[in-house]
Image (cartoon, rainbow, N blue to C red):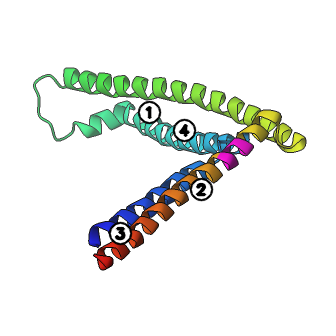
């Protein structure tokens, strides 16, 4: 009996999963714009962090700050040590600058994509569902009905079969 109950629970769970997946709509332009805005926010945050780091490096590159950073280090060639430190900071600063350029390009592209997605979302809302979107909605409803009905029939047959099996067992 436990195996039959498990089978019924499994069938019901399967039905729930299938119908939940069938109900998920395709992404609209408005949802796409929201995702792009989230990406833009991430890019802007990274850009701010890199700008702060670039400012720190600019400050660290000043000769008096390089001198101060190496004050506790003893060396027979302090000029070489200062030059090495300056080169390290300059290389890091150049890397930060190149990352900032990449992020700036990415930000510009995202802003353009957001404008396009907003325009498409406005057009979609003004036009109502298009023929292809309407077909997708109809298809989605049909699929949901078919899956729910088909699975419901299977579950019904299983439950009915269990009762018939039990009844036949009692007679014999």
Question: Of marks 2 and 3, which one's residue comes earlier in the chain?
Answer: 2
Other-residue count near label 2 (Cα within 10 Å), few / some / many at <14 / 14–19 / ≥20:
few
Other-residue count near label 4 (Cα within 10 Å), few / some / many at <14 / 14–19 / ≥20:
some
Q: Quadrant of residue 30?
A: top right
Secondary structure, mark 4, is: helix
Secondary structure, mark 3, is: helix
Dot 1 corresponds to which residue? 58
Looking at the image, can residue 172 be seen? yes
Which circle marks residue 165 in the picture? 3
Other-residue count near label 3 (Cα within 10 Å), few / some / many at <14 / 14–19 / ≥20:
few
User: Residue shown at 35%/35% (left/top)?
Assistant: 64
Question: From what the image shows, is residue 168 above or below residue 125?
Answer: below
User: Residue shown at 75%/31% (left/top)?
Assistant: 116
Question: Of marks 1 and 2, which one's residue comes earlier in the chain?
Answer: 1
Dot 2 corresponds to which residue? 149
Q: Position of residue 149 (x, y in %)?
A: 59, 56
Q: Marks 2 and 1: in contact by CB < 8 Å?
A: no
Between marks 3 and 1, how big is the CA–CA gap? 83 Å
Q: Quadrant of residue 165?
A: bottom left
Dot 4 corresponds to which residue? 43
Q: Is residue 68 left or right of residue 111?
A: left
């Amino acid at each position: 009996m436990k195996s039959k109950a498990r089978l019924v629970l499994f069938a019901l769970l399967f039905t729930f999963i299938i119908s939940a997946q069938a109900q998920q709509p395709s992404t609209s332009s408005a949802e796409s714009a929201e995702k792009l805005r989230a990406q833009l926010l991430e890019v802007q945050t990274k850009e701010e962090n890199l700008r702060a780091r670039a400012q720190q490096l600019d400050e660290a590159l000043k000769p008096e700050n390089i001198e101060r950073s190496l004050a506790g280090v003893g060396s027979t060639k302090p000029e070489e040590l200062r030059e090495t430190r300056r080169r390290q900071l300059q290389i890091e600063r150049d890397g930060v600058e190149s990352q900032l350029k990449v992020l700036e390009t990415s930000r510009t592209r995202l802003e353009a994509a957001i404008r396009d997605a907003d325009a498409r979302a406005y057009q979609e809302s003004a036009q109502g569902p298009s023929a292809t979107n309407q077909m997708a909605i109809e298809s989605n409803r049909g699929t949901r009905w078919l899956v729910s009905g088909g699975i419901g029939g299977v579950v019904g047959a299983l439950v009915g079969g269990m009762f018939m099996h039990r009844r036949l067992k009692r007679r014999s």
